[in-house]
Amino acid sequence: MPKALVVGAGIGGIASALRLRKKGYEVTVVEANEYPGGKLHAIEKEGFRFDLGPSLFTMPHLVTELFELFGKNSEEYFQYKRKDTICNYFWEDGLRFTAASKKDDFIAQAAKTFDEPHSNISRYIDKNKQKYDITAPIFLEKSLHKLDTYLSVQTLKSIFKMGILDINDTLNETNKRFFTNPKLVQLFNRFATYNGSSPYKTPGIMSMIPHLEMDFGTFFPKGGMHQISLSLYKLALDEGIMFNFNEEVQEITVLGKHVTGAISTKNTYKTDIVVSNMDIYPTYRRLLKKQKAPEKTLSQERSSSALIFYWGINKEFPELDLHNILFSEFYEQEFNAIFNDKSLFDDPTVYINITSKDNPTDAPEGTENWFVMINAPGNYGQDWEVLKVKARQNIISKINKVLNIDLDKLIITEHILDPVNIEKNTSSYRGALYGAASNDKFAAFLRHPNFSKTIKNLYFCGGSVHPGGGIPLCLLSAKIIDDLVPKSEEYD
């Protein structure tokens, strides 16, 4: 039986391991941390449970299909429910908007709240779906670096429709063409942050991202986001995949133009296939130091990072839901600070995620577990201790203004995660959440492919390579590798 080694037990790594196992490979996953899941991790503190990483769950079929691959009933491992409310939005002038998950309800309520013609909103949402339908089969589900991707009838049909993708305009310009109310423009501009980019730089094609929430829906996993990675980890164990934790891979070994295995802090592995789930930058700089690196790809602008405060709050807030956004009054300046000044803005947009709304045991009775995040630049050597103190004050000030409370008195426990520790804990270069930013219309083509062009049987998955960051795209990266790797009986 041919062997495969996966470097890193992030969501993309576990999914790749499962797909390789299904193909008949003997699979070992080597992980530097003591737990699986990468950014999809959790902590418990003083009676509060916090998901540390991604907080938004869409496209659950990409998770459940991994169980179905092995003939398993996914519900025996993993349960989730669809949310009726996508997100609650707040502005300092008192305006509040609850985004309904049903498209018709969203359109009707948005038209009324923002005084926008019903037809404009409907047209915008329909066009977003068109963009997704055109691009997903090419940009998300296939390798952009294989010729046969471009020779299919589907691709040729899509190329003739490229004019509607708004790739020559920014997301902000695209949104302003549809809407006159700046608050509604701001609401749809925020979707640039789903791939760690700026709406004033990323192309208008990114307006397809809201389609993932409105047509596919948003969901909450029973037990929290960490259950996504834990359930897949359990499936992997049940299918005979070996996991070696607290073990750091130091080198991917290559002989001639073929990968031969890896050397770790504890073992030397001889394998037929290697998949790196590590960020592409440290993969080359640390694990492939003897190989020629794709310098143009590695020098791409990094995506945004995050500064997150995990607070136990000694009160319940019925006006808040699972997802909540408190918008900055100066949105463009906020992104300018993040991407140009590499600093934090004094009036940040604040995201509050509260899983105890759907999983009451995540917080003691009468309290809530707040995951409070602002977008941040990557780690470029800033004084993060100073930045964190100032950001904490600005975040609390924003929340106090919008919710008319005195938050300081309600915080009974605190944990903080900054770009420095994101980089340290997950090997994400500069703490970038999504690898390279998408602040360029050619960004999709500049991402590293899911295979090595020079080393046979070396593959790459996860958020820093094609098709991008976030849970769905990481899972799709594993699916693309599945298409590239031969079955075990066909292995050469």
Image (tube, grey):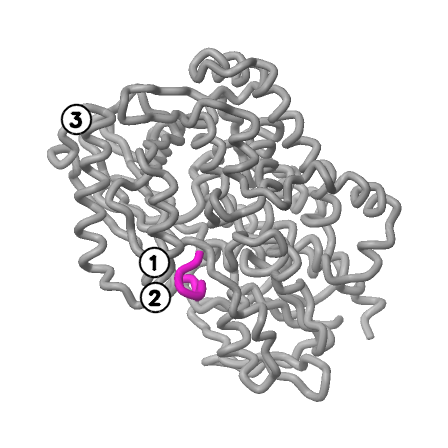
Q: Would you call the spot at circle 2 few (<14 residues within 10 Å), some (14-19), or many (20 or more)?
A: few
Mark 2–mark 3 distance (CA, rounded to whole Å): 35 Å
Between 54 and 64, which is closer to the camera in this rendering? Answer: 54
Kind of residue sitting beneath label 1: Lys
Left or right: 71 as drawn, with respect to 262: right
Q: Nearer the viewer, mark 2 or mark 3?
A: 2
Between 220 and 376, which is closer to the camera in this rendering? Answer: 376
- Residue that mark 3 sits on: 405
- Residue that mark 2 sits on: 380
- Residue that mark 1 sits on: 342
Mark 3–mark 1 distance (CA, rounded to whole Å): 31 Å
- From the viewer's perspective, is residue 180 above or below residue 133? above
Extent of the magenta region? 426-432
Q: Position of residue 328 (x, y in %)?
A: 32, 36
Left or right: 10 as drawn, with respect to 21: left
- From the viewer's perspective, is residue 74 above or below residue 241? above
Quarter containing the N terminus: bottom right
**Secondary structure beneath disc 1?**
loop
Q: Position of residue 152 (x, y in %)?
A: 86, 50
In the rendered structure, which disc, 2 or 3, sits on the residue that comes first in sequence? 2
